[in-house]
Amino acid sequence: MRLSGICVYKHEATGSSESDLREDELVTLDVVTMSSGKNEPDITDVENAMNEILEEKFNCNVDLTFISYANYAEQTSLMLSSGEDADLLPIYMIPLPTCANAGQIIPLDDLLEQYGQGIKEQLGDYIECGRVGEDLYGVTTARDLANSQGFEFVKSVADEVGFDYENIKTLDDLERELLKVKEAYPDMWPVGVASGENIRNWGWDPLGDDMINLGVLADMATEPVVVNLYETDQYKDLVNEMYSWMQEGLIQADAVNTTETYTTLMSAGTAFGGFTNLKPGFAEESSSSLGFEVGVVEIVPALACTNNVSRATWTISSGCDNPEAAMKVLNELYVNPDLSNLYMYGIEGVHYKVLEEGGASNGQDIITWADGVDATTSNYRKSGTWLQPNQFIGHVWEGSDPDIWEQQRDFNNNAQKSVAFGFTYDSLPVTNEVTACTNVVSKYNKALLCGALEPESTIAQFNEELYAAGLQKIIDEKQSQLDAWLEANGK
């Protein structure tokens, strides 16, 4: 399964004539995505620039909404439940099957066939990971579709304290170096936490529900045997390590209750770094977004799971009154660099400037902040471009390699694949058990991974409550579906 290398904008991307694509009456679509959480006063100016393109071609406008990371899952869930204020949006931090089974989003197969050929060309076979049952409900974003796990940190502080990041291969290695930061900066948390979440994944395939992990393929997902993550040595070793770190004062003391992201704390000088998913160019991208140099260390190598692909998928809400128009606009965001660059970076000369025209390997420009603007003062601050439909057709930010998008494609295509890659789990047969177990996981998991709970007794109680809530039935259902998929696909 390979991600297409197509980056050239095709004017007739859908296969229909341009006159066929115009709506009879002006359609305005509510388009939602994630932001940095900072105020973005120039959204209306960017909307107007995007609408010049969209109105001429489709007789469509967009009304942009940006939601902060901390509130994204909750607010988009409310939007989808009400069927209001969101026509097009990426599902993130909510399992795609949950939204599909609740009737909150619509199947896309017919719309893609008629108006989304550009999306299909851009994504190639990866588009199949958006299926729930027989129907396609979401299309993934062009981004890193595998994840390695590691740690991001403030480079200037690291250099000052002699943080030996080149020789960090394990958590024990990282602990040794973090203690240097604690000693030199007693008022700075060596490890900051993002909205109560320290680590989400550490080398397992969650089989579709990475926020709760109810039945996983453990240890880099080399065997097709579904197990209870919270009973594995892999998990126990991890939470024991985090508990030890909390006792040493390495992890943010209010980690469980914080609503801020660790990058906000890094910017404020109150945190040295935090755990994160990694990809090619991560340090350069984060540095340009935050406005200071960051470094990274990889500890868990890249693993590609279906969940990596389907965890961020653009969808059309069932409350959308104009799904054909929504698909036309979504397709355009995947194939039109001018439109995509506006959405991702804002307006040239106002929010960014061109440093080298055509300097990127995809034919786009190398860009940086506009004169007099930086990451803290821009009124349309680039953030979350990985959650936008197709960053691979867009500009490359100064500091990233000119071929960064090619590097990310290679990363996707060369990552170790889970034995269940391509399998999509449907939780509908065990809905009640999932609800009950989710409540149990919410009670314990994040706190354990933050080091806030004593592991030995807590894990025993955690698992007792999980099994009482029906975890074994979930594991059995996952295993049954996986076995059927493996047999159907000759694996």
Image: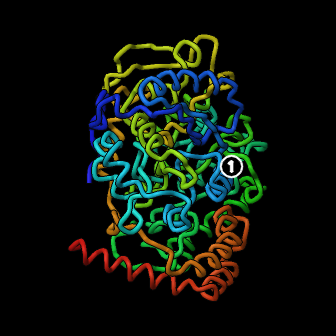
Image-based side of 317 in relation to 443, left or right:
left
Q: In which quarter of the image is residue 38?
A: top right
Q: In this view, does 460 lie above or below 289?
A: below
Residue for point 46% across, 33% down: 24
- Residue 462 appears in the picture as rendered: yes
Q: Position of residue 305 (x, y in %)?
A: 39, 61
- Give the residue pinned by disc 1: 70
Q: Quadrant of residue 301?
A: bottom left
In the picture, the quarter occupied by the C terminus is bottom left
Tell which of 91 and 181 is nearer to you.
Answer: 91
The amino acid type, in three-letter code, at marker 1 is: Ala
Residue for point 46% across, 14% down: 354
Q: Position of residue 469 (x, y in %)?
A: 63, 85
What colouring does the structure picture have? rainbow
Tell which of 54 and 206 is nearer to you.
Answer: 54
Q: Is residue 447 above or below residue 181?
A: below
Q: Which residue lies furthest to the front in this view?
A: 24
Q: Where is residue 165 in the image (x, y as percent from the top left)?
A: 51, 43
Residue for point 63% across, 20% down: 374
